[in-house]
Image (tube, rainbow, N blue to C red):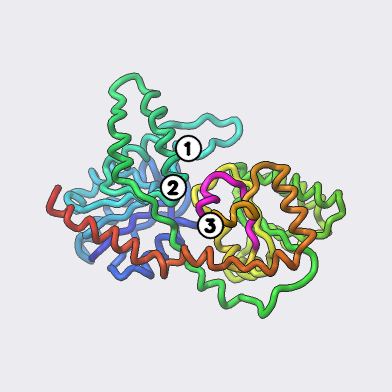
Amino acid sequence: MRIYLISPYHTGSHQAWAEGYARHSRHEVHLVTMAGRFWKWRMQGGALELAPRIDALAREAGPPDALLVTDMVNLPALIALARPWLDRVPIHLYMHENQLTYPPRPGEKRDLTYGMINALSMVAADRIHFNSAYHRDAFFDELPRLLKHFPDYNHLEIIPQLRAKSDVLPVGLDLSCFDAFRPPSREPGPLRILWNQRWEYDKNPGEFFRALYVLAEEDRPFQLIVAGENFRQKPDEFAEARERLAHRIRHFGFAESRADYARLLWQADLVVSTAIHEFFGVSVLEAIYCGAYPLLPNRLSYPELLPSDLHASHLYTDFGDFLAKLRWAVTHPEAVRARDLAWIADHFRWENLDVRYDALMEATSSLNTEH
């Protein structure tokens, strides 16, 4: 079976997911990609670049038996521009994120254009795969409001139709790349707290550092590892934290290589999220695999990552609960280090998910004769 995987925003987790599936699938997976920048232009005009690439690939390698595209694809535009290669090809839409429930930056108003592109792409797709149940439910809760925003011909009837062809398909992870950097034993000493998410407003770093300032004022022992990408020119919360917590910092800044990143994860004892937006949680799972104890908000996609019997100890309900759990952790570093939860991340390995992905691609093969 020949699968074209279309990834117009090919960087970070999108790139890792696409290349991971291509490596692990038993099928012939061809990547059609564009550089991971200018996301609005990718959604508006990416099909202009992707269509001729699909044409060239089809002539060279043969036409696709299935298409797997990400949410950054304007699918109706791509289908129109890539005729006739896509006329009777089953199309799977993978929703890493959506632009309808993604929180706008402070002071910004949501542009409904991109949420509508997502919705139209869903209508055009044969199957829709969300990376978490939270993501699926949040999108379909908001979709009626999007459609009702327009003056007429709202077509609310598409909502149950889209739900019916949707499922939850977790992101596959390549975790073996961390194994070469596993230390022989965990280092003793003060608890090492990890932040390995983007330095962005939707990850709510202010609340994270606010809690650390309280611990520091109480003179509780801990060290800080701050990684993750920074896309802002002046990430004020991080600049302040670097100054106020200077003597506790073990690392501060983006890890320049995958090897450096892996070493940092293995050093960490506890990984924290304070996010107000998360559709899956790749960085948290990577840290858990490397031995970090997770402390996460009881919201978004996080409850899906952990078995329910771990929720009470690893999910917090509000800032007070977060602070209480942090206090316990810094007071009991050896108990934190003794808790090995790597098996949680193992569930999301490509080795455990590739068969599921392949089966979904194969299940639509009959659609070739139904269109």
Q: Quadrant of the N terminus?
A: bottom left
For discs 2 and 1, the disc positioned in front in the rendered view? 2
Q: Taking 14 as reference, is 218 left or right? A: right
- At a point 41% along the width and 27% down the height, the residue shown is 145
Q: Taking 370 as reference, is 361 left or right? A: right
- At a point 71% along the width and 60% down the height, the residue shown is 225
Give coordinates of residue 88: x percent, y percent. 17, 51
| Cα distance between the residues tagged 1 and 3 | 26 Å
| Cα distance between the residues tagged 2 and 1 | 14 Å
**Mark 3 is on which residue type?**
Pro
Q: Which residue was labeled with disc 2?
A: 133
Magenta residue span: 293-307
- At a point 20% along the width and 64% down the height, the residue shown is 62
The first of marks 2 and 3 along the sequence is: 2
The first of marks 1 and 3 along the sequence is: 1
- Category of crowding for the residue at label 3, using alpha-carbon neighbours closer than 10 angstroms: few (below 14), some (14–19), many (at least 20): few
Secondary structure beneath dot 3 equals loop
Q: Which residue was labeled with disc 3?
A: 307
Q: Taking 86 as reference, is 205 left or right? A: right
**Residue 95 showing in the rendered view:** yes
